[in-house]
Image (cartoon, rainbow, N blue to C red):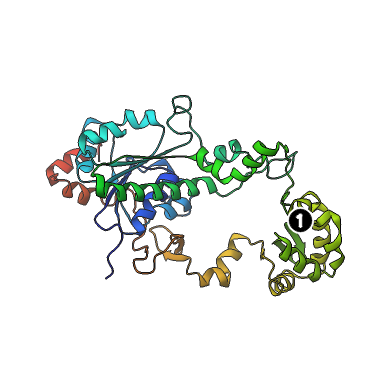
């Protein structure tokens, strides 16, 4: 069997919701041993968007594959001692919570270094560790809203955020990248460090184009729905039986598009001489494209656009996305059974793969505390001591 990239790396996952847990899941996909530290009775993120009989949620299943679960009351003295024992054999601690909470739980970098000097702490939070904002909390939507992205989506009268947690998942990807870099650097220095990522910094990165443009040009752009203000036609269009998106960027694409819709005269129209002008006059272009699409089915429109090599795709429901042949051809899903699921769940595989040492999803997410006893035994606790911890409500 091919050795995994992160084989021998041990990760303690105190993460909640997506940014922390999905970071740890990505590390596990590449071979790291990941122990999820659950609250007694199950942590709150386990039960968001429930899909199982016992309430486990869709994002929990996606973000916690390839892990073992230990239930622990980390607020108790006995629980803190368990954490100390686990940290001694760990390489990475993942925790997405405000810095003050980390310190209160003894999971801040200084406390962890006292236990294991070369430990790496991957700490994501809503706003980062700067004193002015470290106390504030937030979720994905707050990052989207404060980055300018929500303002530029929807319409001026009705701002709109993405209904999927793009900032959370992008933060998790950044956390995983930072963790890998810290592990790489440790090979030569022998020292650990803090990997810090904030939801707001991630959101600002995603919205960076609009922010740079506004800072330099001061255009005070307003929302234009699904229509791009920077090039065109780029919009969502209705066909006879559904919706598609088409994006025309650059002169070669615009030339092909104008010929496709039978309007080559647009190439000589001064309103459409470059991307900037096409964005400024995008409402006209979207109107023309809308009329072209209105007489075609979704499949017909997409077939003609594909033949003209114009980027386009169908607007899918989640069900359609699951059933699409292109999605299936990607091998995008690992179908996993889980206790209480009526059918196997499609866990989305790592977005990055390697040709010789690829990631893999080898085990379903753990049930609450499923591996508590075996993890404590590995940490040196006897069966009598484990029973005592259970009696105290610590494990």
Can see residue 35? no
Residue 314, image quadrant? bottom right
Tell me the SS state at disc 1: loop
Q: In the rendered view of the protein, which quadrant contains the N terminus?
A: bottom left
The residue positioned 81% from the left and 65% from the top of the image is 294
Horizontal and vertical percent position of residue 52: 45, 54
**Nearest the eye: 181 or 321:** 181
Vertical order, 221 against 235 (above or below): above
Looking at the image, the residue that sits furthest to the top is 132
Counting labels gives 1
Residue 377 lies, in percent from the top left, at: 16, 49
Residue 58, image x, y percentages: 47, 53
Residue shown at 41%/46% (left/top)? 175
Between 64 and 223, the one lying in front of the other is 223
Q: Which residue is mark 1?
A: 274
Residue 10 placed where, x, y %? 26, 50
Q: Is residue 282 left or right of residue 306?
A: right
Image height of 37 relative to 358, above or below: above
Judge by depth and name the residue closer to the eye, 63 or 153. Answer: 153
Which quadrant would the C terminus be assigned to in this image? top left
Give the quarter of the image for residue 297: bottom right
- Residue 133 appearing in the image: yes
What residue is drawn where x is 74% and y is 43%?
155
Quarter assignment of residue 305: bottom right
As displayed, is residue 108 above or below residue 45? above
Dot 1 alpha-carbon crowd within 10 angstroms: few under 14, some 14 to 19, many 20 or more? some
């Amino acid at each position: 069997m091919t050795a995994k990239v992160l084989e021998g790396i041990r990760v303690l996952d105190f993460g909640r919701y997506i940014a922390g847990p999905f970071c740890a899941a990505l590390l596990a996909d590449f071979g790291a041993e990941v122990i999820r530290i659950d609250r007694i009775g199950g942590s709150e993120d386990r039960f968001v968007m429930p899909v199982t009989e016992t309430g486990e949620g869709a994002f929990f299943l996606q973000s916690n594959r390839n892990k073992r679960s230990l239930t622990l009351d980390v607020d108790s003295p006995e629980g803190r001692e368990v954490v100390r024992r686990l940290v001694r054999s760990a390489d990475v601690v993942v925790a997405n919570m405000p810095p003050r909470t980390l310190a209160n739980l003894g999971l801040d970098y200084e406390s962890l270094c006292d236990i294991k000097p070369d430990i790496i702490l991957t700490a994501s939070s809503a706003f980062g560790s700067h004193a002015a904002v470290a106390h504030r909390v937030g979720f994905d939507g707050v990052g989207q809203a404060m980055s300018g992205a929500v303002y530029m989506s929807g319409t001026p009268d009705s701002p709109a955020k993405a209904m999927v947690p793009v900032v959370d998942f992008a933060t998790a990807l950044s956390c995983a990248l930072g963790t890998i870099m810290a592990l790489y650097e440790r090979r030569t220095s022998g020292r650990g460090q803090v990997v810090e990522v904030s939801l707001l910094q991630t959101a600002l990165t995603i919205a960076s184009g609009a922010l740079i443009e506004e800072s330099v040009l001061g255009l005070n752009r307003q929302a234009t729905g699904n229509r791009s203000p920077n090039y065109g036609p780029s919009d969502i269009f209705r066909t006879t039986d559904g919706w598609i998106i088409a994006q025309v960027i650059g002169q070669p694409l615009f030339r092909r598009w104008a010929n496709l819709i039978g309007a080559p005269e647009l190439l000589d129209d001064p309103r459409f001489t470059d991307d900037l002008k096409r964005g400024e006059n995008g409402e006209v272009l979207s109107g023309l494209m809308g009329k072209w699409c209105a007489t075609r089915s979704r499949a017909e429109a997409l077939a003609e656009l594909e033949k003209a090599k114009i980027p386009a795709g169908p607007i899918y429901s989640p069900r359609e996305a699951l059933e699409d042949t292109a999605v299936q051809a990607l091998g995008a899903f690992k179908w996993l059974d889980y206790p209480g699921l009526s059918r196997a769940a499609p866990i989305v595989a790592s977005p990055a793969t390697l040709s010789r040492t690829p990631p893999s999803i080898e085990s379903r997410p753990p049930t609450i505390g499923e591996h508590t006893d075996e993890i404590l035994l590995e940490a040196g606790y006897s069966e009598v001591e484990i029973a005592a911890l259970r009696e105290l409500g610590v494990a």
